[in-house]
Amino acid sequence: MSLSPGDPESIGGYTLVDRLGSGGMGVVYLGRSDSGRQVAVKLVHPAYALDEEFRTRFRQEVAAARRVSGAFTAPVVDADPDAPQPWMATLYVPGRTLADIVAQDGPLRGGALRVLALGLVEALRDIHRVGMVHRDLKPSNVLMAEDGPRVIDFGISYAVDNEALTMTGRLIGTPPFMSPEQFAAPREVTGASDVFSLGSLLVYAATGNRPFDGSSPYLTGYQVMYEPPALDGVAEPLRSIAERCLDKEPGARPDLGELHELLRALPDDTGAPEASVASASSIASVTSPVPVPPGRPVPSGSAETHHQVSTAPPDASGRRPRRRVLVGLVGLVAALAVTGLSIAAVRAGSDSASPSPAPTGPAASTAPVAPASVTLPPKHVPWDYQIGGAYPPAANVRVVSRSYEDAPAAGLYNICNINAYQAETGEERDWDADLLLRDAGGKVVHDKDWDEAVLDIRTAAKRERIAAELDTWIDTCAAKGYRAVEPDNYDSFTRFPSYLEAGQAKALMKLLAVHAHAKGLAVAQKNTAELLSDHASVGLDFAVVEECAEYDECGEFADAFGGNVLVVEYTEKGLARACADWGGTLSVVRRDADVVPEGAAGFLRGTC
């Protein structure tokens, strides 16, 4: 993606030419040195630069990455962890992650699987040789370059001769790819822990499935510690190798030398037995003659065909509710992922690493939590809708809604917008393949008006996994100082009635409301007049509504939320009607259809 307004032109002497990805803790840019060398520059968000514990972790990541060098890791070329905004530059590695490849092209087999396995063993050898344990080997931390894999992200690695920074009572890692000892004694992990993770990763690469995959982080952890791995579809001899790597006892696992010899003997037909799995040529075609920066949409002609679905409009008026695109969480596949993305929150069924409170009882209730500490936005005040790009608010503005990637506006009531029910254009690869809604033929269902893949919220297990990912975004909102969260696309079920139901949408929103309230954030209902009667039971506190005057819905929202409604209109007619009917009681703003930042072509903002 191109640079955004407000992005720096250079960092540490490197000219920035592109955004490779962005997450809760920072942004990764494609940079170029004066000599023309391409680097991936990781820049920490200003809010976290003031957090000394975060700085300590960032210093640890820089130090760990500097110690490790080898053909299958991405070296650090420059860094300043003590800068006002800490940053680190690593060698730019064009290529997709293993998670992307398996999700889009299917599992690996034959020569491709052997190249991956041997490359990972060599990478772990280089990491262990300098006294490090990676602790977060997972599909999204493996870049598939043209000449072999690269292991990235040392944000939670552990120097065996130093005390780990593991926080008391929290887990650090990614449950489906963690070892038993990471759950039981995280300060005592050895290189054998990475061997266990490698076993899980190879099963995933060969089948597209994780050997441990519970419906919650805690159930996944229980499986890792006490249950045998699920190895359906793993052919011999890889199955026997994986079983040894996944032994619960660290001492029973093969060392890297033995593992190297075992993997060298893998036959060309090793992998999942299905004919649809990716061949070795899939790896060779990961990068194009002109490298595609990580996180970019796959060019047309890629292996996966996406099914574009258009359904009947959600109401008798025939309208398609207007809503805006949020730049969502990008898979950071630059040389190292942004520090903190991998330690944001434990997420089962995903490969994003995270800490989570140690379990103290049953899984969290899905009933809304009474938001005793939640502050609602002030009613009937000037406000602004900036989810397409932040800019300085007008002097009288009291409330502003922005993308969770942007910093909140100082001194105002800030609402954090996240895309909760659909994946952003080009970013469906950031979601596990089975969390994307698919038709009877297995093709991804798209909201064609916005070119967004729809998330599969049809089962409780999948809703929990989706919520676990979205909770990390909510955590980011809270950490940045936002006062509320605005989960977008609550109304997706109305556009895909042959797949989704209202009850499923409400069930996911309840999970998000529980987490947001626990973080002290109020929760906005975005559009979705169909579910207004359920807003209290779901846990929704106020409303953000697009074009309610245009389509005569403002009164319904005002009644449901006691007038705590923020209105966005996109037409002159809509603004005129909103101001005439509701300008004295509700907060109203008109924005341009693309909600572009001030100064960009097409920018428009008006009020009553």
Image (cartoon, rainbow, N blue to C red):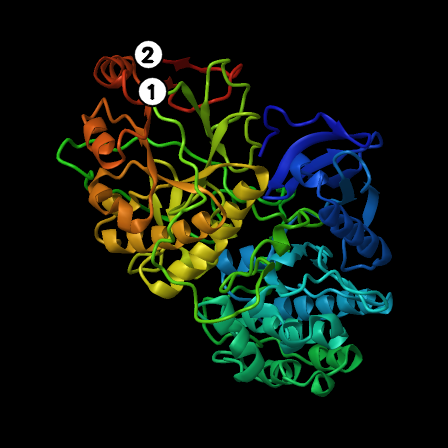
Can see residue 501?
A: no
Give the residue displayed 55% in from the left and 26% down from the top: 409
Disc on the earlier residue, 2 or 1? 1
Pick the front one: 282 or 439: 439
Which quadrant does the N terminus fall into? Answer: top right
Which corner quadrant of the image does residue 523 belong to?
Answer: top left
Q: Residues within 10 Å of mark 1 (few under 14, many from 20)?
A: many
In the rendered image, residue 160, in percent from the top left (x then y), is placed at 82, 69
Task: Tell me the SS state at disc 2.
Answer: loop
Q: Is residue 497 left or right of residue 175?
A: left
| Residue 99 drawn above or below residue 209 | above
Pick the front one: 371 or 465: 371
**Residue that mark 1 sits on:** 588
Pick the front one: 587 or 450: 587
In the rendered image, residue 202, in percent from the top left (x then y), is placed at 61, 72
Give the residue displayed 71% in from the left and 67% down from the top: 120
Kind of residue at badge 2:
Cys
Which corner quadrant of the image does residue 581 belong to?
Answer: top left
Q: CA distance from mark 2 to mark 1?
A: 7 Å
Task: Tell me the SS state at disc 1.
Answer: strand
| Residue 340 drawn above or below residue 165 | above
Q: Is residue 99 left or right of residue 83?
A: left
**Are the residues tagged 2 and 1 within 8 Å (C-beta)?**
yes
Numbered circle sitting on residue 440? none
Kind of residue at badge 1:
Val
Q: Residue furthest front?
A: 372
In the rendered image, residue 536, in percent from the top left (x then y), is placed at 28, 46
**Residue that mark 2 sits on:** 608
Give the residue displayed 55% in from the left and 25% down from the top: 411
Q: Residues within 10 Å of mark 2 (few under 14, many from 20)?
A: some
Which quadrant does the C terminus fall into? Answer: top left
